[in-house]
Image (cartoon, helix red, strand yellow):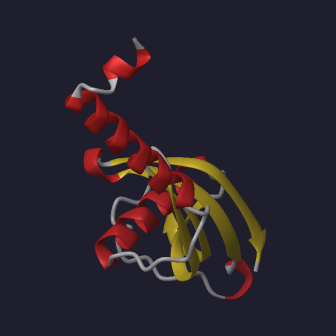
Amino acid sequence: MGIRCWRNPLLLLIALVLSAKLGHFQRWEGFQEKPMSKKNMNSMLNFFIQSYNNASNDTYLYRVQKLIRSQMQLTTGVEYIVTVKIGRTKCKRNDTSNSSCPLQSKKLRKSLICESLIYTVPWINYLQLWNNSCLEA
């Protein structure tokens, strides 16, 4: 009975496709540094800084100063570990014109290095910040 089921070409084809797919995912070796398109990187960084500013208790907004490192891993979507330098701006939380806020100077200046794990499903435009930690630069 077990041998007869393999005589069906459709079942054999399904078994081959599944084994090929599973083998493909087993070869993926965790987070890797891969180039990302400028569009994807900008949307990722914008999502990160909006999430950071929403969670922050600071009176002033922050902006990304520099992308330090980016790594990705394929899972059910795409996971990114992003390391960035962010700086405190002169714009306050309730400012509506915060698209081009200059950075603070002198005693209110503050820079942080943040490492974040961001999960995305690009084909449905879904982003979620899973983990974030920042230290003073």
Left or right of 37 on screen, residue 8:
left
Q: Nearer the viewer, residue 44 or 36?
A: 36
Instruction: Identify the residue at image location x=33%, y=27%.
Output: 6
The answer to whether residue 74 is above or below residue 40 is above
Residue 31 pos. (x, y %):
60, 65
Specify the quadrant of the image occupied by residue 30: bottom right
Q: Quadrant of the C terminus?
A: bottom right
Q: Residue at x 68, y 81 (%)?
A: 109
Residue that extends furthest to the top in the rendered view of this protein: 1
Q: Quadrant of residue 3?
A: top left
Q: Nearer the viewer, residue 131 or 33?
A: 33
Along the viewing direction, whichever of 10 and 110 lies nearer the viewer: 10
In-image side of 8 versus 28 (left or right): left
Q: Which residue shows up at 54% across the image and 61% down it?
A: 28
Q: How many marks?
A: 0
Q: Position of residue 107 (x, y in %)?
A: 74, 82
**135 and 102: which one is in front?**
135
User: Among all residues in the image, which is located at the extreme right?
Assistant: 136
Image: 76 above or below 62 = above
Image position, residue 86 (x, y; %): 60, 75
Residue that appears at 39% across and 11% down: 1
Residue 72 % position (x, y): 52, 65
